[in-house]
Image: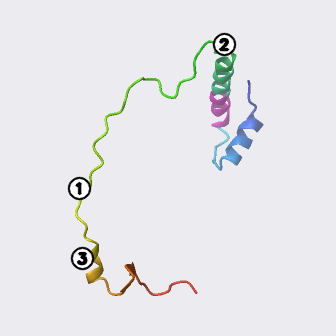
């Protein structure tokens, strides 16, 4: 697929990119090459290829789900200026 300079300008506008006029031919060539590659990849017959969720059949090593930190909830609430029902009370900032 071949893009025109107008296509590149429109894509740049939609992507909110500022491209100088001197760079447009290079972008036109590169984007056309990328779209050409996508067309080639779409043409490949993949009917005999099984879909994969992950390319490697490996199991991830996970650590035990154990609490390793102590609970400091009471200490933090004791030094807070204003607490009610375990919630920090702050001045209203939006009317």
Q: Is residue 91 left or right of residue 62?
A: right
Mark 2 secondary-structure assignment: loop
Q: Is residue 6 above or below residue 17?
A: above
The CA span between labels 1 and 2 is 52 Å
Q: In the figure, residue 56 lies in which quadrant?
A: top left
Residue shown at 66% from the left, 14% from the top: 47
Q: 31 or 86: nearer the eye?
A: 86
Which one is earlier in the sequence, the residue at label 3 or at label 1? 1
Q: Is residue 90 above or below residue 6?
A: below
The CA span between labels 3 and 1 is 18 Å
Q: Main secondary structure of the magenta part?
A: helix
Which one is earlier in the sequence, the residue at label 2 or at label 3? 2
Which residue position is annotated with label 2?
A: 45
- Which of label 1 and label 2 is nearer to you? 1
Which residue position is annotated with label 1?
A: 68
Colour scheme employed for the rendering of this structure: rainbow
Check if residue 21 falls in the magenta segment.
no
Residue shown at 23% from the left, 55% from the top: 68
Assess disc 3: are there few (<14), some (14-19) or many (≥20) residues with their C-alpha within 10 Å of its C-alpha. few
Stretch of the chain drawn in magenta: 23-31
The CA span between labels 2 and 3 is 64 Å
Assess disc 2: are there few (<14), some (14-19) or many (≥20) residues with their C-alpha within 10 Å of its C-alpha. few
Residue shown at 57% from the left, 22% from the top: 51
Which residue position is annotated with label 3?
A: 75
């Amino acid at each position: 697929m071949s893009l025109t300079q107008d296509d590149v300008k429109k894509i740049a506008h939609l992507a909110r990119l500022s491209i100088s006029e001197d760079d447009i031919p290079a972008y036109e060539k590169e984007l056309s090459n990328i779209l050409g590659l996508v067309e080639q990849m779409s043409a490949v017959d993949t009917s005999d290829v099984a879909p994969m969720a992950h390319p490697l059949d490996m199991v991830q090593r996970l650590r035990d789900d154990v609490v390793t930190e102590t609970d400091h909830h009471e200490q933090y609430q004791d030094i807070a200026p204003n607490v009610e029902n375990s919630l920090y009370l702050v001045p209203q900032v939006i009317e």
